[in-house]
């Protein structure tokens, strides 16, 4: 059954996300797709021309466009319902602290921080702030990922035994590779893990929902054209001491633009999902039968809900709609609706991910 939600339109301000930013366009479209949010203010870029052009394209009044985050907070605290932090990952820490300290809700692009030290400071600030914090892990917004989570939690494939999740990309290996400057260095946690590893961990964490994650071994390598920067990671982990998880993420896999996939094996069945075919979930049982579950069709547990079917089955939704599903969840949470966001997309999920990735980095140094 669909959850009851209010249609109150909430007001957003963007920090970052100018017209030259892919993530900015994504959030602008997704946040307003269902008419639940409106972008009304922002400091979209340090570049004056980009800032002005972005505001014009989003229909933001010129008197609500600011040249710094400090000015935005000073003028908009108490007016907007949340500020979206869409700057590069290394800038998240200072930005999120400033917004929380002003008592304003924050929607932050992953990864929330670059180290556990930064995360702990954000955690302390959140505990004393009137604001809420949401972190966008967009792949968990896909309806068939949520269907997989529900199938597993309801016991449909039995006790989970094995999980494999990988996210190979080619951006560091292609000829004339030219990643942004902030991606050409590593932080307390390597940048490839902040970019991709957070997604791999969160997808397993969200779908399987283990109580514990323990890194058994890890290998970190540099195979691409950016010297001295880690671009590939292989991890063997144990979940709840009974589930074996094999994970990989990297940016030096030629031929893969985004090869994110997840496989979960239980003692009564198995599930497979791939980001390139997000409308489908493949299910196998223990007598040799396989079934293809499709969003909006058949006897589904959650993916038949109206909120996941903006248009009828057979007309695919995708990346932007998955982001829009997260914004619908955030809207529910901010307006007092029923939501699992505090655990799955708030600080607890971000903390679990950064703890895991820190352990991965430490294990890789001993490999």
Image (cartoon, grey):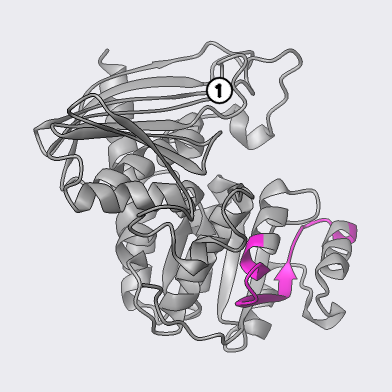
Instruction: Say whether residue 8 is visible.
Output: yes
**Residue found 77% across the figure and 68% down from its top:** 67
Displayed quadrant of residue 75: bottom right
Q: Report the magenta residues as a range.
A: 30-49
Q: Is residue 244 magenta?
A: no
In front here: 19 or 2? 2
From this view, report whether residue 309 is shown above or below residue 183.
Answer: below
From this view, report whether residue 28 is shown above or below residue 252.
Answer: below
From this view, report whether residue 256 is shown above or below residue 157.
Answer: above
Figure quadrant of the C terminus: top left
Give the residue number, with chain letter if any, for mark 1.
251
Q: Residues within 10 Å of mark 1 (few under 14, many from 20)?
A: many
**Residue found 30% across the figure and 58% down from its top:** 348
In front here: 273 or 193? 273
Q: Position of residue 271 (x, y in %)?
A: 31, 35
Q: Relative to 137, is 156 on the left or the right?
A: left
């Amino acid at each position: 059954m669909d959850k009851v939600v209010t249609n109150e339109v909430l007001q957003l301000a963007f920090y970052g996300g100018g017209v030259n930013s892919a993530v900015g366009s994504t959030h602008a479209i997704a946040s307003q797709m269902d008419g639940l949010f409106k972008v009304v203010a922002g400091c979209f870029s340090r570049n004056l021309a980009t800032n002005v052009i972005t505001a014009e394209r989003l229909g933001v009044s010129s008197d609500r466009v600011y040249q710094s985050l400090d000015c935005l907070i000073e003028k908009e605290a108490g007016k907007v319902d949340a500020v979206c932090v869409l700057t590069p990952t290394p800038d998240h820490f200072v930005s999120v602290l400033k917004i929380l300290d002003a008592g304003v809700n924050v929607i932050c692009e992953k990864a929330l921080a670059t180290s556990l030290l930064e995360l702990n400071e954000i955690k302390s600030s959140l505990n004393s702030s009137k604001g809420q914090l949401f972190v966008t892990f967009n792949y968990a917004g896909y309806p068939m990922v949520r269907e997989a989570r529900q199938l597993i939690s309801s016991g449909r494939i039995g006790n989970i035994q094995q999980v494999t999740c990988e996210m190979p990309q080619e951006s560091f290996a292609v000829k004339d590779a030219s990643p942004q400057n902030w991606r050409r260095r590593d932080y307390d946690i390597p940048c490839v893990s902040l970019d991709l590893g957070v997604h791999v961990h969160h997808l397993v964490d969200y779908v399987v929902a283990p109580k514990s994650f323990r890194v058994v071994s890890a290998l970190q390598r540099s195979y691409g054209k950016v010297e001295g920067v880690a671009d590939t990671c292989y991890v063997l982990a144990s979940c709840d001491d009974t589930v074996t998880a094999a994970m990989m993420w990297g940016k030096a896999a030629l031929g893969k633009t985004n090869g994110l996939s997840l496989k979960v094996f239980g003692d009564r069945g198995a599930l497979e999902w791939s980001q390139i075919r997000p409308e489908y979930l493949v299910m196998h049982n223990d007598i040799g039968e396989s079934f293809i579950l499709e969003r909006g069709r058949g006897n589904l547990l959650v993916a038949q809900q109206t909120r996941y079917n903006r248009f009828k089955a057979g007309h695919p939704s995708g990346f932007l709609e998955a982001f829009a599903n997260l914004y619908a969840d955030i809207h529910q949470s901010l307006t007092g609706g029923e939501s699992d966001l505090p655990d799955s997309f708030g600080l607890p999920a971000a903390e679990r991910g950064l703890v895991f990735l820190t352990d991965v980095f430490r294990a890789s140094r001993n490999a």
